[in-house]
Amino acid sequence: MQLSELRGRSQNADRAFRWLAAGAAGIVLVVLALIAITMTDRARPVLGRMGLGFFTQTTWSVPTNTYGALGFLYGTLYTAVIAIAIAVPISFGVALFVTQVAPRWVRRPLVYVIDLLAVVPSVVFGLWGLLVMAPALGLQPSYLAAGIILAIMITPIITSLSREVIETTPVTDKEAAFALGATRWEMITATVWPHSKGGLVGAVMLGLGRAMGETIAATLVIGNTVHVTANPLAPGYSMPTVIANEFGEAEPLHKSALIALAVTLFLITIAVNLAATWIVQRSMRRSRGT
Amino acid sequence: MKRSGSIQLAAAVAVALASPGCKTSEAPPGGGGAGKVTINGSGATFQKAAQEIAIEAFAKVRKDITVNYAGGGSGKGRKELADQVVDYACTDAPYKAEEAASVKGGAFFYIPNVLGAIAVSYHLGGVDKLQLSADTLAKIFQREIKQWDDPAILADNPGAKLPSAAIVVARRADGSGTTENFTRYLHEAGGGAWKLGSGSTVAWPGDTQAGNGNNGVAGIVKKTSGAIGYLDLSDAIENKLRYAAVKNQAGTYVTPDAASVTAAAEGITPDDKLLFSALNGKGVAAYPLTAQSWCMVYEKQTDKAKGEALSAWFKFLLTDGQKLLPEIDFAPVPKALADKALAQIEKIQVP
Amino acid sequence: MSAPDLRAKPGWRSVKDRLMTGLMLAAVVAVLVPLAAVLASLAARGGGIALASFPDFFTQEIPRFSRRAGPGMGPAVIGTLLVTATATALAVPLGVLGAIYLHEYGGSGRFARLVRFMATVMTGVPSIVMGLFVYLLWTIRFGFSAFGGALALACLMLPVVIGASEQMLRLVPGHLREASYALGATKSRTILTVVLPAALPGIVSGCLLAVARAAGETAPLLFAVGAAKAFNWSVLHEANTALPSQIFGNALDVPAAQGRAWGAALTLVLLTFLLTLAARLVTGRFALKR
């Protein structure tokens, strides 16, 4: 065969491969577009009926075709806030411990073990929370019970990301602080904290996004009752949990309402995740520059 | 991971996706394997235990038929049968007029297969016996009475010591025939006290707790001190819950058990569709919250194997299946009614 | 925070330092305690039923009468394997191909940047939203099946596989590619025979982690797979079941069923731990390092 023929044939194969790969990459766009289209289309009936009342009313009554999602929005936010309030101090503490305090030989095994927490499926946490933790703490199904379980689940994420951010603190800054006679805690507040602040905020927001979208573990322990109250011991409800509970036998308008909830949840978690990713990336880029 | 291998796999997947495969626009396919038939049912959790114990026994008798019962509530069962997503459905209450219009498969039969008590379960430390009248029940469940030591409850229980604790009401989140029967009873017997109407869901007050299925209500009552809820007696006993004696029309406080349920069933008058209500029975020994549950199946079956399997399954439910009911605290249907039901089953048309 | 006052009394400063270190240690304990508690519960409550009459738990069907205590969960184990394997077969080739496009061809072009951004968005989609999406597009038309669940899980895995694979491709040294071109190979040939094998261990590791996460997802299964009690070896036909959905359903059921839920939870956790361990081994031994 002529060399030019050989080259021609392999060039066709080459181009075909490139198109195949591009197609595979494009599937991401196709799937997201499909999600956006099908779900907003199905969500429209209920929004047409309720208008903005969908977001401002708390009455969710299937017999009267009234769908106000405020109770669920509140519940999603409230459980996430409780989860963050518990998880953040612990995650920061662990991240600081692993990066600044722990002797070298402890670090890797400790990180290994903590990451195992991230591997445990959420449904197992839900089962354990329902049958072991809540009774042990004397807790009924409530916002607090859900918040604690969510906190346990998002701690590994926040910890691991915080670790990465903290580790970019320039060693020279830390050594300078020690050289001036600072204790380790003083070094942390003087150098690590100002440097990592931004990135840590991003890490927390990623944890927040995860807490808001978590369905199964929360469904088992949240109490399944709409309750706009500041009392954490009250039973509550959230967007993902009501969807999981009620979708099975919903009539069309009811289904539309649940899908509208899903779209709302989708948009909120996407917004939080994107903001968080942007903050973390910006902080990492900045720190590499110094 | 060779590229060509995975491309072939992707192509195979695409072909499988494109082929018509298993559509469920009609009833789900027979599935299983050579000679095996699968029939799928869903609906009332009131009789879920009755269905399951019968499925277990039936599997030993007919190894070629697999029955799946998914539960999900009477509302779900009625909807799925109307949409022809399942082969049969169970319900504690018949279709309402507007629901009946959406039934796609034509005429269908109601086959009563179980009677049972709706127990009013409660969780209150130190209180072993409790008596409640319909009027008091209505006020408790619509949150007019909020404390256990309310005068109305004390009036029903002369001489009893009730703590000054808050009442937590447990009710159903999903569309439930048990709810429909319970609220119907409160409406009929409550003397005007019950204001929320009757239906598979009602506009419960906001400060009540909701569970999925009868088991969900059991879970709430089990876990929550001060809770009160309505659920089938079988699940109440299985979860070791205490339940109250309810005042019947004759003025006696009756505890739910096999005898009082059978006494309530004595007065029923089924119509020609075999629909009836065992609630609020007139007998002296009748338990007023006795409820019933039916299986529903289409008269004209489209799949021969499934049609025969369904006939065999319902016959079993109404013969050997009835003997299993007392073990799980349900009651069999009266013999005359069972005979009429068997006659209905004979009318199922198999191609 | 302003700079610490290094002139303050040394006694108080070191007390504060030690206090803070103590708090950090407490945080570490706070993370390890739930992990240990969950594992202990799994072993105690699940170990009995899963191992006492081995292999009954894995070979017997799920009891029709849920009040019957005792094994098994065989159909759920098979279902999990079927659903997860199918999801992997869908997501991994597409994800790796997509990553190849992004890194080797797309660079920083507009299409590539859009796909990368959308992939980040997609990692944040709550699993219940994905479940609803597959329900609307697939389950309504084709009924419950293992394949529906696999579709949903594949959508969840895809962005993770793309991200991990692209990271690994980035680590392949440029001179390997250049040497291949110098020998006259086409771009596609280079990628398939030089770049991919070099990045493979890291990609495999990333995929194993994605599979571990997918195996534990529950919400998509509720909307696409169903809850069969008998063995179903078919991927496309009839409802199936899987470990996470059985755990969820049985958690709210009678005590006999809850016992089976613990056994299923133990099995699921062991499965995900095994996958994670495999991923870490592959990374440790074979992968390219940063």
Image: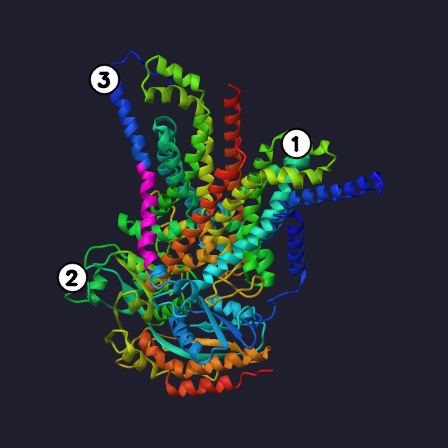
User: Which is more toward the observer, C69 or A221?
Assistant: C69
Q: Give residue A61's position: percent from left, percent from top.
A: 45, 56
Q: Which residue is mark 1?
A: C108
Total marks shown come to: 3
Of the residues shown, which amino acid type is indicated by label 2?
Lys
Q: Earlier in the sequence, mark 1 or mark 3?
A: 3
Decide whether residue C39 is among the magenta residues.
yes
Spatial distance from mark 1 to mark 3, Cα to Cα?
56 Å
Left/right of residue A163 with respect to residue B350 in the rendered view: left
**Quadrant of the rendered image containing residue A147:** top left
- Type of secondary structure dominating the magenta stretch: helix
Say which element carries label 3: helix
User: Which is more toward the observer, C113 or B132?
Assistant: C113
Q: The magenta stretch spans which residues? A: C29-48
Q: Give residue A124's position: percent from left, percent from top.
A: 39, 51
* Nearer to us: label 3 or label 2: 3
